[in-house]
Amino acid sequence: AVAMELAARFPERFSHLGLIASPGLRPHASFRRHPIFRHVIPPLLNFKPCRYMLGTWLKKGFIKAGFPENLSIDNIYQTMQIVRGISFREIRQCIPMLQQPTLVAWAEDDAFVEGAISRELARTCPVGPRLCFHHGGHYIQKHMSLEIGEALIEWILGYHGKQVA
């Protein structure tokens, strides 16, 4: 969401945009089913006793969704604060302003952002590679790093008229 907004507001600073397991144009299923995760829990995490108790509980969910087991409570706190700040209205406003070719990558088995939302984002973003993986979860930058890296290299080098060896 931050990358989309920056690219939309400062197009001269971006030649390409890569969106990997990105939030879409509307809240995904877990946001719709459990608004408490977005609106109630993040402020509670500001209190250290709540941070540990809720963080331990949240960590189980993060691991189940494919995040690494060594994820710290502080990492979860930071992630929840970022999630709290996502404005789907602002994302929808940024998309028409994007000028950069845009890579969109997602996994159909993402526990946070369902495939339909990622496909919708892919349809509305400027032209660029679309990488849809059947497996990889929400953490595809780890699980599919080689495939994503190869696609990025080919795309960027190809964009500048160079051949990939």
Image: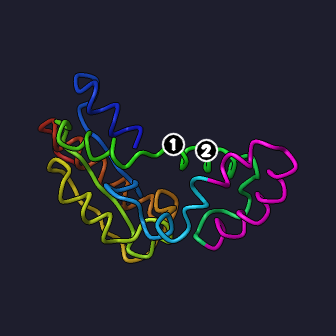
- Magenta region: 40-64
Q: Amino acid at mark 2?
A: Gln
- Image check: 53 left or right of 72? right
What residue do we see at 46% from left, 62% from top?
Answer: 140
Q: Callout 1: 10 Å neighbours few (<14), some, many (20+)? A: some
- 117, above or below 163, in the image: below
The answer to whether marks 1 and 2 mark residues whose Cβ atoms lie closer than 8 Å is yes
- Image check: 82 left or right of 163? right
- Residue on which the image places disc 1: 85
On the image, the x and y values in percent for residue 120 come to 24, 63
Quadrant location of the N terminus in the rendered image: top left
Residue 81: give its label. Answer: 2
Q: In which quadrant of the rendered view does residue 56 lie?
A: bottom right
Secondary structure under the numbered disc 2 in the rendered image: helix
Work out whether residue 67 or residue 42 is closer to the camera in this orientation and state it: 42
Membership of 9 in magenta stretch = no
What residue do we see at 49% from left, 63% from top?
Answer: 31
